Image (cartoon, rainbow, N blue to C red):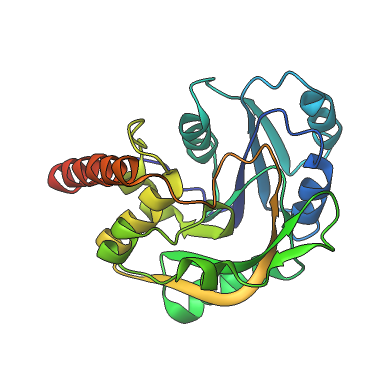
């Protein structure tokens, strides 16, 4: 059972790996929106560039906690960051995006008004260093985003950098199976199944950066890999719901 900590409102779980190029811009955009009692938990998975030096500068901020990742891949690093959060609401964050002003408060408002357990918001997609080159005005439109277990089992529209969820979901989603392709799909679908309420906000509250080193892909896999991924995911999903 994951312990709750009612003194912390918002936790942001961020994972990093060789992210020096864009990391400062993202961390700044997050900290600007966090209150004194909130926290930014950053798990670095053994970066070999200047990421660690950048992060140490932010450690002076009492809201920032730095962790050494398990070095077992991105899903286990995400799990490690999430497990070390203490807040009532857990936001996921990549190392290279930009949070738009008002994101945190708008998502918290959606939790309250929609009685949701998972909230996902839209994003604008851009390329390169500065957010002036917009590739896509709506990631939701690109993915056909909406809630639903079967819908997202077939075509996932959960995107981790745009997700937040209530702490009560932790006992359902952890541990994250190493066999599955995407942790965000896992969190979103289990939230839909167990809690029955995910909210998809059509407002773009984040600038989603695309560059040559992104961990997530925006293109489709080949048909055989797609089928395999779905079968593996469905098997892990069945095992989780049968034992919980």
Q: Quadrant of residue 149?
A: bottom left
Please name the residue shown 37% across and 53% down the image.
169
State left or right for residue 235 relative to residue 50.
left
Residue 49: horizontal and vertical position, in percent? 78, 22
Residue 143: horizontal and vertical position, in percent? 48, 66
Residue 93: horizontal and vertical position, in percent? 62, 49
Depicted 147 relative to depicted 227: above or below? below
Residue furthest to the left: 242
Residue furthest to the bottom: 113
Residue 157: horizontal and vertical position, in percent? 44, 62
Q: Residue 6 versus residue 175: which sits nearer the camera?
A: 175
Q: Is residue 34 visible?
A: no
Please name the residue shown 25% across and 63% down the image.
150
Depicted 212 relative to depicted 128: above or below? above
Q: Quadrant of residue 16?
A: top right
Depicted 53 relative to depicted 221: above or below? above
Q: Residue 143 versus residue 116: which sits nearer the camera?
A: 143
State left or right for residue 9 relative to residue 194.
right
Q: Residue 166 versus residue 136: which sits nearer the camera?
A: 136
Number of numbered discs visible in the structure rendering = 0
Please name the residue shown 33% across and 40% down the image.
225
Q: Residue 138 versus residue 80: which sits nearer the camera?
A: 138
Q: Is residue 85 visible?
A: yes
State left or right for residue 73 relative to residue 197.
right
């Amino acid at each position: 059972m994951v312990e709750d900590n009612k003194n912390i409102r918002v936790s942001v779980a961020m994972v990093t790996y060789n992210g020096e190029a864009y990391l400062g811009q993202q961390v700044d955009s997050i900290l600007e929106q966090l209150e004194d009692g909130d926290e930014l938990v950053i798990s670095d998975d053994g970066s070999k560039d200047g990421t660690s030096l950048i992060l140490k500068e932010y450690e002076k901020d009492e809201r920032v906690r730095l962790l050494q990742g398990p070095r077992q891949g991105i899903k286990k690093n995400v799990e490690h960051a999430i497990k070390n959060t203490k807040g009532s609401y857990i936001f996921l964050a990549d190392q290279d995006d930009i949070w738009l002003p008002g994101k945190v408060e708008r998502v918290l408002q959606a939790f309250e008004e929609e009685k949701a357990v998972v909230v996902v918001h839209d994003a604008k997609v851009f390329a390169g260093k500065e957010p002036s080159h917009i590739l896509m005005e709506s990631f939701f439109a690109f993915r056909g985003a909406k809630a639903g277990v079967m819908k997202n089992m077939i075509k996932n529209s959960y995107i981790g950098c745009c997700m937040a969820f209530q702490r009560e979901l932790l006992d359902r989603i952890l541990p994250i199976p190493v066999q599955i392709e995407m942790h965000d799909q896992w969190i979103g679908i289990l939230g839909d199944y167990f809690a029955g309420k995910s909210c998809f906000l059509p407002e773009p509250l984040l600038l989603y950066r695309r560059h040559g080193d992104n961990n997530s892909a925006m293109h489709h896999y080949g048909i055989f890999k797609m089928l395999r991924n779905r079968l593996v995911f469905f098997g892990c999903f069945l095992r989780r719901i049968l034992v919980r």
